[in-house]
Amino acid sequence: MSRLRTAGRRVWTVWSWAAGALLLGAIALGGLFAWDYYGRDEPQAFFGRDVPDDPVMQFKYGSTGGDRLIGMPVGLFKALPLLCRDYLPGEGWESLGFIYEAGMDRPIGTSLRRSLGFDRIGLNCATCHVGTWRARPEDAPNVVVGMPSNRVDLGGFARFLTQCALDERFNPWQVVQAAETATGERYGLLDRLMLQYLAVPAMKEFIVLARHRFRFLDHEPEPGPGRFDTFGPAKALLNWPLDRLPPRERIGIVDFPSLWLQGPREGMQLHWDGNNISVDERNRSAAFGSGAVPTTIDREAIAFTAAWLRSDANAPPPWPFEIDRDRAARGQALYARHCAACHGASGRDFSGPLVGKVEPIARIRTDPCRLDNYTEALSAEQNNLYAGFPAERFRHFRKTDGYANQPLDGIWLRAPYLHNGSVPTVRDLLEPAELRPAVFYRGNDVIDTARLGFVADAPATDGRAFFRFETRCTGDAAACAAAANPENRHDDNVCVPGPWAGNSNRGHDGAAYGTDLPAADKDAIVEFLKTF
């Protein structure tokens, strides 16, 4: 009996060890699977060892690293326009101005990264720096990389996300159902559980947090397509006490700039107010706006894209229509006399004593709100952003006293004009401020070949509605005074809050800017600028 018991114990011990080993093996395999499935961090890239280098595709669809922090599962990104279509002005993300190309199932300006077990979509720099133009409303749009995103409505995008996340339909079950409908795929049990009990609740909480952080939008006029408050997101990400800021510092809406030919711009005062002279810092600062913080930024991808942005390959396309060469030749002489010192000799020759230098607000007298929005305190905090990374630390952000004179390469694709996009065409900019349009329409990408800009005098065409942009009060004098129109109070060049704050089209006028020239001379300058 004793021997049988001893043998039984030995058998039990062997089986216990075997079962334990199998359990440990299963746990190890499960851990390896979980690590491979949920621990992978792989962006879709268009350069490197496995694919041919394609800087244009990388710019349009590559990651800055921001998708590590705020990337949205692909299914959710595709589901939201279906789930909350009544909060959009039309069908899909296209109704907010996002551009889709053949062969891609997501719009330009979005990256794709496999992380946390999902393919996740985030925004990148192309969201704001790829636009379109057409010769006629019925034509297919021409996509131009580096051009300001003249149709994308980031204000509308932020508003849509908030409205959808706060809607009762934004619950785990309906979101997952809409995601499966949008993608045409059925989620497995594990993915479904992860979406329902992790991804969707986390996204809802994130959007609610972002809504609070981005409350600066509640204090500003509606940006409309092609504009946004570019340093408001920086303040939001840095958790500034926005409600305690002086009112004059709360409005910073500007037009999206072009990104062509960054190499020759090194050393110029960059951004609209000239607050930095380093192209590299400008790039990393822009990536910060997409959510790429120092610990998540994709340095290799940023470096690859930055090298292309500096190169001659990143240049604007030439004017595609006929040019009156005789008129352009006469315009060249007029331009050299009135414009070249500040804006360069041509669209490729940026030489000029004042090119890339800040024009004091007391002289330029354009809308001061963006200038007041960027403060000494913000520049100091930006210079500390990479404090834990000494080799990358920002060192060049400074508060200035005006707006920077910029080269005019590709000027025909950069409308509307001035830093806040308040003047629809170059020909309008050559008029005194009081003669510029008080109201025009943004979002059209049809070229105005006569006045140099986009057609801006119609509220809709070819079934598309455009954004009504008001540069000042257009009612009777009493109503305008009652609305505290900042146009009436700009003598001190300080941003005064009001319904049109940040939208003024004043300034850049007088003899020094050519607005007192005869009409024929102005037309000649416009013709010459078509060669840029």
Image (cartoon, helix red, strand yellow):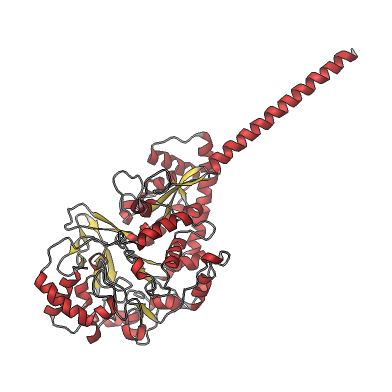
Which of 183/411 is in front?
A: 411
For the point 66% across and 31% down, the residue is 25
For the point 47% across and 73% down, the residue is 396
Q: Residue furthest right?
A: 2
Q: Based on the displayed image, in which of its 4 quarters is residue 328 positioned?
A: bottom left
Question: Does any portion of residue 166 appear in the rendered image?
Answer: no
When the figure is inspected, residue 232 is found, relative to residue 307, above or below; the finding is below
Image position of 451 (left or right of 506): left
When the figure is inspected, residue 119 is found, relative to residue 478, above or below; the finding is above
Question: Does any portion of residue 327 appear in the rendered image?
Answer: yes
Question: Can you say which quadrant of the picture contains the C terminus?
Answer: bottom left
Which of 141/343 is in front?
A: 343
How far across and how far down the image is residue 426, in percent?
A: 21, 72
Q: Based on the displayed image, in which of its 4 quarters is residue 480 positioned?
A: bottom left
Image position of 111 (left or right of 466): right
How far across and how far down the image is residue 98, in percent?
A: 33, 54
Image position of 525 (left or right of 112): left
Q: Based on the displayed image, in which of its 4 quarters is residue 305 positioned?
A: bottom left
How far across and how far down the image is residue 29, in percent?
A: 61, 33
Which of 505/419 is in front?
A: 419
When the figure is inspected, residue 509 is found, relative to residue 210, above or below; the finding is below
Q: Residue furthest top?
A: 1
How far across and how far down the image is residue 479, in percent?
A: 30, 79
Q: In this figure, what is the number of numbered marks?
A: 0
Which of 333/117 is in front?
A: 333
